[in-house]
Image (cartoon, grey):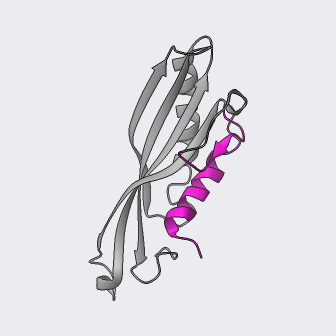
Amino acid sequence: MTHVRQQIRERVATNVTGLTTTGSRVYQSRVYNLEAANLPGLLIYSNDETSERSSIGLLADQDLERTLDLVIEGYASTASNLEDVLDLIAEEVETAVAADPTCNGLSKDLFLSGTSISLTGEGDSPAGVLALTFQVSYRTTTTAPGTAL
């Protein structure tokens, strides 16, 4: 079985695959090299995660309440309206992710906790990246991190 963190990433990737702007150009890695043919596209990865002992349940001392920062980066390169393209990507991604806040039962909650946008005019054409950070709350036991509670 895979870690619940990976299962959440995979579920979110499924939820954002096929969006109008980014299509099937969705990659589960923060180090994927996006060439022009992959744009606009999305990268999905886990960032930081914190855990604390749960105070809920019969075996609370073995349960972990986890909070994961899941990042979806949207990349685009265009000659005009770059910020508009990034905002369109944000709207599509936010809507798709919000439609499944429990990641098919893997998480207790998921919400957008931050957005950052970077633009550059260097290179052949302007390029930009949009980073959407989602906070995901989920529970596991200390002995079964591959099973969501």
Count of numbered labels shown in the rendering: 0
User: Is 101 located above or below residue 91 in the figure?
Assistant: below
Q: Where is residue 108 in the image (x, y as percent from the top left)?
A: 43, 64
**Which residue sits furthest top?**
80
Query: Front-most of 34 and 106?
Result: 34
User: Is 131 located above or below residue 140 in the figure?
Assistant: above
**Left or right: 33 in relation to 129:** right
Q: Where is residue 76 in the image (x, y as percent from the top left)?
A: 60, 26
**Left or right: 133 in relation to 11:** left
**Left or right: 148 in relation to 11:** left
Is residue 18 located in the magenta-colored stretch of the structure?
Answer: yes
Residue at position x 55%, y 54% in the image = 100
- In the rendered image, which quarter contains the N terminus? bottom right
Residue at position x 52%, y 24% in the image = 128
Q: Where is residue 60 in the image (x, y as percent from the top left)?
A: 31, 83
Query: Front-most of 28 and 52?
Result: 28
**Left or right: 122 in relation to 69:** right
Residue at position x 64%, y 30% in the image = 40
Q: Where is residue 82 in the image (x, y as percent from the top left)?
A: 56, 17
Query: Front-most of 119 and 93?
Result: 119
Residue range corresponding to the magenta coloring? 1-30
Is residue 10 located in the magenta-colored stretch of the structure?
Answer: yes
